[in-house]
Image (cartoon, rainbow, N blue to C red):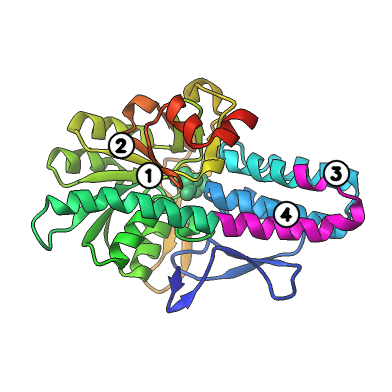
Amino acid sequence: MKVDGRHFRSIWLEPDGVTVGAIDQRRLPHEFVVARLNDAEDAAEAIRSMLVRGAPLIGATAAYGVALAMRADSSDAALDQAYKLLIATRPTAINLKWALDEMVRLLRPLPPSARVEAAYARAREIADEDVTINRDIGRHGIELIKAIAATKKPGEPVNVLTHCNAGWLATVDWGTATSPIYQAHDGGLAVHVWVDETRPRNQGASLTAWELGHHGVRHTVIPDNTGGHLMQHRMVDLAIVGTDRVTANGDVCNKIGTYLKALAAHDNGVPFYVALPSPTIDFSIDDGVKQIPIEQRSAAEVTDMTGRTADGRIETVRIVPDGSPAANYAFDVTPARLVTGLITERGVLKPDRAALASAFPERANGH
Ligand code: MRU
């Protein structure tokens, strides 16, 4: 998508054909800074520190991380070491494991002399495939927005609520939840987005609002607790969120607070959709609450907040009394029964095993 008129992806191979560029998402929305990843440890640290984040982008970064590792040493031992390093960075997004498994499946049978070229080619392909998948998610998701627009008065926007950042910054381009929104906006449909701020790291307030603003999409940032009130007052036409892992039977793991939005949507008859690329499906499990590992992050993300002062300095302040402990569960699970539909690259599916398996038989059978 565009940043001040220039097209950017969230990650790319630099013109040297070796190092990897990425937007440093820790610095947004106040500073637009590009980082360079020179080796596998840089890629791992970028994921760990959330310089890059969002399930599909974590996967693409890990794939490039393997390519960088192979460039330094293309032996079997180095491949194992890269896998071990990268898989340990974040536990919840299954795209990380998917991308690493893809790389290892391709590289292991090759002689070490052929691995560097093959690794870069597959990493680029994974990034390119993500762009195509997300574009297709938008192509299917826009029909949901169009259907609602058709029942509204002319000029009245369709109000979409989203949580966290499942935008182009969380993927390689387009985003998942935002792809239908961008395509609706680009096609001349009036849309307005309620952007959950998404405490504690504020991916909604910092990243989704930044993206939508740069693309000219109308939006309003709301505190996380506001969605239920807006739904009661018919101010939300549909919710679209992203996900870090969907189980074989359609349970959805996403940023903490998603479950509460789904409950509120259910209570108010608001359609609740989840947009996902197929690498986010984990066909090996079928109980999201019991089986998906939920990342717990530093309490400092809850006790402290970072922002820009009026005179332009970036400062971190504490908002919790000294000595009060804080808990930071980064994700939660929304059971399939609360999900209206799954917007995938192959269409909008029912959140159940039969629909997922018949749309993605190659994944369901060979997970
Ligand atoms: O902790 P984050 O910022 O990596 O969490 C991101 C999300 O929860 C997104 O909704 C999810 O990864 C889907 S991104 C298309």
Q: CA distance from mark 1 to mark 3?
A: 38 Å
Give the residue drawn at x 23%, y 53%: 146
Mark positioned earlier in the residue sequence (2 or 1): 1
Between tags 2 and 1, which lies in front? Answer: 1
Disc 1 target residue:
241
Q: Determine crowd level at label 3: few under 14, some 14-19, many 20+ residues with C-alpha closer than 10 A.
A: few
Q: Which residues are magenta?
A: 105-129
Amino acid type at circle 1 is Val
Q: CA distance from mark 3 to mark 2?
A: 46 Å
Q: CA distance from mark 4 to mark 2?
A: 35 Å
Disc 3 target residue:
109
Quadrant containing the C terminus is top right
Disc 2 target residue:
261
The answer to whether residue 48 is left or right of residue 321 is: right
- Mark 1 touching mark 4, by CB under 8 A? no
* Displayed quadrant of residue 213: bottom left
Mark positioned earlier in the residue sequence (1 or 4): 4
Residue 256 percent coordinates (x, y): 42, 37
Mark positioned earlier in the residue sequence (3 or 4): 4
Amino acid type at circle 4 is Gly
Mark positioned earlier in the residue sequence (3 or 2): 3
Give the residue drawn at x 15%, y 53%: 150
Q: Secondary structure at mark 2?
A: helix
Find residue 190 and name its label.
none
Disc 4 target residue:
65
Q: Name, please, the residue furthest toward the left.
A: 153
Q: Determine crowd level at label 4: few under 14, some 14-19, many 20+ residues with C-alpha closer than 10 A.
A: many
Inspect this view and state whether residue 217 appears.
no
Amino acid type at circle 2 is Lys
The answer to whether residue 282 is left or right of residue 322 is: right
- Mark 2 touching mark 1, by CB under 8 A? yes
